[in-house]
Amino acid sequence: MMRLSLVLALSLGAASAAGAAETLSGGSSTVTDAGREAYSRPSPALTPERLPEFFKGRGLFRQSWVIPPAEDIEIAGLGPLYNRISCAACHLKNARGKSPDGPDDDAGGLLIRLSVPGRSENGGPRPHPVYGDQLQNHGIPGVAEEGRVSIEYAEFAVTLADGETVSLRTPKIVLSDLRYGPLEGDVLMSARVGPAVYGLGLLEAASDETLLDLERRSKRDGIEGRVNRVWDAASGRVAIGRFGHKANVPNLPQQIAGAFLGDMGITSSLLPEENCTATQKDCRMAPSARRPELAPEQLDAVVLYVRSLAVPARRNPDDPEVVRGESLFREIGCNECHVETLQTGRFAPLPELSNQTIHPYTDLLVHDMGAELADGRPDFQAGPREWRTAPLWGIGLAASIAEHTTFLHDGRARNILEAVLWHGGEAAIVRDRVKGLGKSDRQALLRFLESL
């Protein structure tokens, strides 16, 4: 009884087992909290013995890292080149990062992926020989930052069937003050904002076979979808990708180690080399706190923290407008990619997540989303027009928790409707059905999505 009470108190209450099953978005990892901390609660299924490591990981996730050398070596290692000083800076309260509103707005929540044509030795994007695979806009003293990033937008109107117009904005990446020379030749650039991090352990616990079954299943309206096969740095082999906007990372340890290195310049046992290219001599000569800078037990704690973050329960599922919107969601065909229900398998890294029925509204596959969303940059087997289906669970709380409602890989969409209207390629037929709805039906559909 004490064990159950402790977990429930820390999570602010698991969703009641007496409630409708579809409200349990994360299975036993569901919480009923709908406040500012709803994305930050530990799974109610997490055993009390794991809670100290959960809170250690949370502290490291929120920690502002410092430049070495430093008295506290546990939090030293920032740089030599970096974008932000903490994980939470890009994932405030574990929510999505925010894109800048224009060229004069801070681009801190956005990063720029870089590559040149061809493949790296492990089959992924080929880094730029001078600037690497990510532009860093900060450097420690004595190391010049790589450059500055701003985003400009061009607006255009889309007219819906009932005459309502919606303004969409097309982003343009603008790089300036490039400190290591011009970006010459055929350079591939892609703007990205950090995705939400709650519920990721449950997505990791869905088996490879589940994803392959989703790839093979029959779909309507010309929708296809496929897994992205990527490089697993720990095992040294090809694996199925499931994290990142192009499903280009196979598991959470690699995703988290990659973010520490790429975003903060902090090395780990998985990625032990600093993010300096051969031509960046000052960067290569800069001091390190230790090798690796993120100790193995620190990486393990952050991985546990992210793996065991709970998912908010659905709200107002019996509201008549929500029920009608859910029916429209299925009739229109949104659930062909945003698959409502998945089953997790046996998950040895965190058995509490095993054998759960979850409702993430994703198939974790990459789909051709059309020319307008294309970034022109392939990533392993995901093509320039392909993006992973974003999970929709918890999306209705974005405005209150993240204090913004920007969506898609680069945050160009300012609300859910804009995000839908950007869908093209395989999703064009479904998008056009949404455009054809009357105002009442369109509002019902949005009301359903806001209930997730």
Image (cartoon, rainbow, N blue to C red):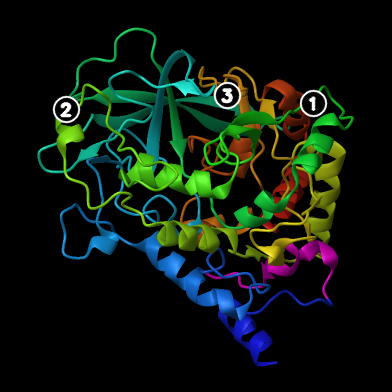
In the depicted structure, whether residue 328 falls above or below residue 356: above
Asked whether residue 29 is drawn in magenta, I would say yes
* On-image quarter of the N terminus: bottom right
Q: Which residue is mark 1?
A: 223
Outermost residue toward the top in this view: 185
Q: Is residue 370 left or right of residue 220?
A: left
Q: Name which of mark 1 and mark 2 comes first in the sequence.
A: 1
Dot 2: few (<14), some (14–19), or many (≥20) neighbours within 10 Å? few
Residue drawn 65% across the image and 79% down it: 13
In the depicted structure, whether residue 146 falls above or below residue 4: above
Q: Position of residue 44 (x, y in %)?
A: 66, 74
Which one is nearer the viewer's eye here, 198 or 282? 282
What secondary structure is found at the residue carrying circle 2? helix
Residue 44 seen: yes
Q: Amino acid at mark 2?
A: Lys
What secondary structure is found at the residue carrying circle 3? loop
